[in-house]
Image (cartoon, rainbow, N blue to C red):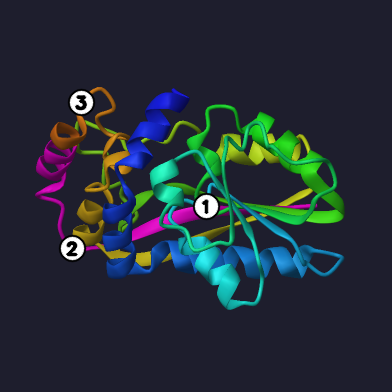
């Protein structure tokens, strides 16, 4: 599965950039998560591990705030777009860092992409210094404004390797966790743009080629209309 995940993200930097230009979604998630992490941390946060940093949407937010994060990602193609001075291609299930290295580990829109989130949480615990803080966000779903699930009448569900509740359970094995929910107003056009990203279209049609899965995803979602809401769960642990 990890090879498939890496391959899907290797194909995705340009489409991720286009979606972010349309919505600003991942940058907003990063800002909110880091604010929640700073509020929970008992010590100043001087060293960040941006775990699953990808092409650098979250990394850029950290750099703008004066931090100098280490950006880690499984995908080399995504990392090549990342502006961090320190970039590491690796799996956050097996972090290549010594114990007690970081003040904070942030999984901005990434921890739900591993089938073993408990292992990643243990690794985050290991590399954090005493008093360090971990943060993660995970998608809950897309709804119409009346609360109905956008995907319920369709023949597919957009599923991550790990659901939001499993992400929370994994973090609770290693941390004392607070959590909450963020809801964003969005559009059907943005829903289709997200699933034009090869790695996201794989959530609907994992066995198809990248081109075929995107075409099928766009056909599936073509008749979705009207204002929508996108829901995320956030977690912060110490």
Marked residue nearer the N-terminal end (2 or 3): 3
Stretch of the chain drawn in magenta = 214-238
Of the pair 43 and 146, the residue shown nearer to us: 43
Which residue: 45% across, 31% down?
161
Whether residue 163 is visible here, answered yes or no, is no
Q: Residue beneath label 1, please?
A: 53
Q: Is residue 142 left or right of residue 178?
A: left
Tag on residue 208? 3
Q: Is residue 196 left or right of residue 82?
A: left
Tag on residue 155? none
Q: How far from the left and from the top, in percent, is residue 148? A: 31, 50
Which residue: 50% across, 33% down?
162
- Give the label, 3 or 1, closer to the camera: 1
Crowd around label 2: few <14 · some 14–19 · many ≥20 (10 Å): few
Which quadrant of the view contains residue 43?
bottom right
Q: Residue beneath label 2, please?
A: 226
């Amino acid at each position: 599965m990890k090879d498939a995940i890496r391959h899907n993200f290797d194909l995705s930097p340009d489409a991720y950039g286009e979606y972010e230009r349309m919505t600003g979604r991942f940058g907003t998630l990063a800002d909110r998560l880091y604010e929640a992490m700073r509020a929970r941390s008992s010590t100043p946060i001087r060293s960040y591990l941006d775990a699953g940093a990808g092409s650098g949407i979250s990394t850029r937010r950290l750099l703008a705030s004066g931090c100098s994060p280490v950006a880690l990602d499984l995908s080399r193609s995504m990392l090549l777009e990342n502006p961090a001075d320190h970039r590491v291609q690796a799996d956050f299930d097996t972090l290549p860092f010594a114990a007690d290295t970081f003040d904070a580990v942030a999984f901005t829109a990434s921890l739900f992409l591993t089938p073993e989130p408990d292992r990643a949480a243990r690794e985050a615990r290991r590399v954090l210094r005493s008093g360090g803080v971990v943060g993660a966000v995970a998608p809950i779903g897309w709804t119409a404004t009346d609360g109905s699930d956008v995907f319920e009448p369709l023949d597919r569900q957009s599923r991550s390797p790990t659901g939001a509740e499993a992400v929370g359970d994994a973090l609770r094995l290693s941390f004392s966790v607070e959590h909450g929910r963020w809801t964003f107003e969005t559009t059907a056009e943005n829903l289709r743009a997200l699933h034009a990203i090869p790695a996201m279209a794989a959530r609907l049609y994992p066995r198809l080629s990248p081109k075929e899965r995107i075409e099928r995803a766009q056909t599936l979602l073509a008749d979705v209309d009207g204002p929508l809401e996108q829901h995320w769960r956030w977690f912060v642990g110490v």
